[in-house]
Image (cartoon, rainbow, N blue to C red):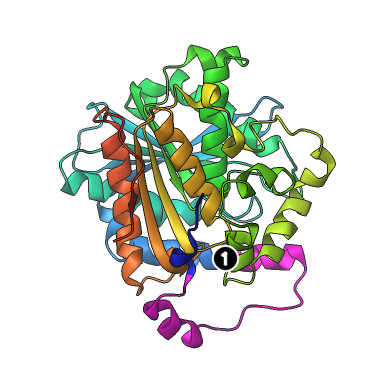
Amino acid sequence: MADFTEYGVPSAEWVALEPTLPAAPKNLSVEELKALLNKGREESAAQDMSDGLSAEVQLQDYTIIARDGYPLEARSYRPASVPISERLPVYLHLHGGGFLFGTLSSEDGICSRIVTSRVQKGTPVVVLNINYRHSPEYTYPTAWDDVEDAFVWLHENITKIGGISEQVVMGGISAGAWLTASLALAQLRGEDKRLAACPKIAGQVLMIPPLVQWDHYAPRLELLKSPDLSSYVQCATAPILPVTRIKLFTELLGLAETKNAVGDRRMSPGNATAEEVKDLPPTTFGIAGNDPLRDEGLFYGQHLAANGIPTNVHVFPGVPHGFRRFKTLPDSKRWDEVMSDGIAWALTSPAPGPFEIHSK
């Protein structure tokens, strides 16, 4: 029986930083909040690019036509130092934001840092960033459909991207990690013939992942020494993503109308059975300690390791969900390393091993 509460105690670095942060905006409509946060994300990404990243990467925009005819935005990031004729492994990136926030340009800094990191370490990749659709305009399962369509498009256009079909690693942050985990299971199930026809995903990188939909979380509680030790209890009022914000995202996504879909692995990949996960690819986890989502990420990592899947599990103790936006935190640099190194690690075809948590 598990107890992960040691990771939830706020770190000294976070305790020192928190009083210096501006107050969270209040009394904003969903639309106003969405516009404000997207603007901030894009400004931060633009600053990252102007600080030197733009000279290191080549950007190319694409349009992907979704199954309902909607034009999805996509952008590739290639190392400027690598000839366009050289085919590279691909990292398919999906942003976070509770299915409410995020734009194509908000990910420029993240994607470019991955590209430059892999060049510096001698294992370059090309990154493909997908801007799936968001709530409240689009509810479940639109984002899931969009990501599946983008995955198929990538393989149909792998030469245009300059990628290698058998070396596609997929991953994302928060909501993007959820979408990644769902697609990886969907490809194994084979119900969508288009997904099944694509080469198997070479690896997945799940950063601060939500993996079990709120109404289907009960099985996870049985794995704890006591339900009172749940990260949903310990971290209920944590900064950035308190439980009230999770409930808002769930409501906007329309998941309340799908309570009877207990076996829907798109909705709750973290509840997959041993049989369902046994052929998943090597999986890296990046988990924030002071985050209501902490336990489900750790339990999924434990579950994969127990069923022969190579896992690479990292915890950032005492920091909240989405802490990477605060660049002065020491763990922000480590976050970048976990993402970048997780891609390269998957491509080495690592062997299975015991469940281990790396916290520093």
Residue appearing at x 31%, y 70% in the figure: 330
Question: Considering only vertical position in the picture, is 83 above or below 10?
Answer: above
Indicate left or right for 323 with 49 as reference: right
Query: Residue 30: which quarter of the image?
Result: bottom right
Badge 1 element? helix
Task: Give the camera-side residue of 151 and 232.
Answer: 232
Q: Position of residue 195 (x, y in %)?
A: 54, 18
The residue beneath circle 1 is 39
The crowd level at tag 1 (other Cα within 10 Å; few <14, some 14-19, many 20+) is some
Question: Which span is picked out in magenta?
Answer: 9-37
Residue appearing at x 30%, y 66% in the figure: 51
**Magenta run includes residue 64:** no
Question: Considering only vertical position in the picture, is 230 above or below 271?
Answer: below
Residue farthest to the bottom, as pictured: 19
Q: Position of residue 247 (x, y in %)?
A: 73, 58
Question: Considering only vertical position in the picture, is 17 above or below 206?
Answer: below
**Magenta run includes residue 21:** yes
Query: Residue 24: which quarter of the image?
Result: bottom right
Indicate left or right for 175 with 278 as reference: right
